Image (cartoon, coloured by chain):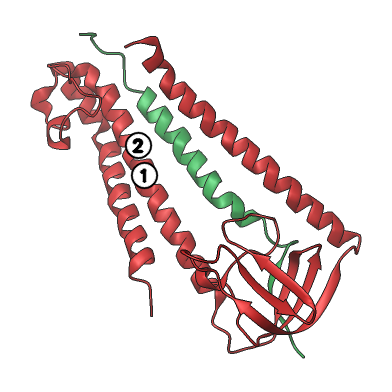
Chain colours: A red, B green
Amino acid sequence: MTPVLRAVPYLVYGFAVLFTVFSFVGTYVQLARLRAAVGSGRVQVVEGQVTDFTPLSDFGNKSESFRVSDHWFAYSDYSVTGGFNNTSTHGGPIREGLPVRVTYVGNTIVRLEVADPKRPSSHTGRSRVLLSTLGLLVFAAAGAAYVSLIRRLARYRLVRPTSWQHDSWVQELNPNNYSHDGQVVLGGFRPWIRALFVLEVLGAIIFLKFSFFAHG
Amino acid sequence: MHYDVVFDVNTVGYEAWLFPGGMLIFAVIAVLVVRSVPPGPVW
């Protein structure tokens, strides 16, 4: 393996760690700033009916917006501000004509209250998006863990796999393709491999169910 | 008029840790399992 190829996993891992750290710091600083503003009473409140409501469209408007009295608010699920950003397209509670009381800092909603008891539960829509994302993450993570494990176990293969993708999982799990020691090691890891397969299938089912079959 | 609170910046936060926390635990377990494969013969 060339030094460049050897460095790839470290680069990917390093990028993932840096991305996570920067994302956390960026969002946490905004959240802390908003909470400090609320704590010191530096907020404004507007109350009334939602007007000029424009929903987010995944292929058009990049944000959802509405007006209460003379104040205009805009936000998007894709823009994390620490404040309210759950659009109705993704299960949020805002509808045209809805009586609301909005507490805000600048243009960021820090507290949202609605007064329509018949409103659809925003929790349901939110949960659907979260579960769909969770399913996809479980699917991807279980797949990645399986590939990593099989690559390690390939040390015991009788014939060295030529591609980084190796071959079909039927071949990867066939004990006849492993040395005698390898068959023992492979046997020891079978419970983990089964668990990863279960997670893979479960993740796919959860993702598909909450992405495409959750309406109505 | 009675209002229901649907969002409050002071009560959000902990659920934001569920995904990264869960993924981190999964990643640590996965790395430990993968690294527990004993060193084998080198071709």
Q: Amino acid at mark 1?
A: Ala
Query: Image point 24% across, 17% down: which residue?
Result: A155
Residue B5 visible to an observer of this rendering: no
Asked whether, in this view, residue A190 is left or right of residue A52, the answer is left
Q: Are marks 2 and 1 in contact (CB under 8 Å)?
A: yes
Q: Which residue is label 2 attached to?
A: A144
Q: Amino acid at mark 2?
A: Ala
Q: Residues within 10 Å of mark 1 (few under 14, many from 20)?
A: some
Residue A183 visible to an observer of this rendering: yes
Q: Mark 2 vs mark 1: same chain? A: yes
Q: Quadrant of the C terminus of chain A?
A: bottom left
Asked whether, in this view, residue A199 is left or right of residue A159, the answer is right
Mark 2: which secondary structure? helix
Residue located farthest toward the left when viewing the structure as drawn: A176
Asked whether, in this view, residue A141 is left or right of residue A177, the answer is right
Image coordinates of residue A125 in percent, x first then y, are 50, 71
Mark 1: which secondary structure? helix
Image coordinates of residue A76 in percent, x first then y, are 60, 62
Image coordinates of residue A213 in percent, x first then y, are 33, 70
Q: Quadrant of the N terminus of chain A?
A: top left
- Figure quadrant of residue A193: top left
Judging from the image, mark 1 belongs to the subunit labelled: A
Q: Which residue is label 1 attached to?
A: A140
In this view, the residue in front, A22 or A148, is A22
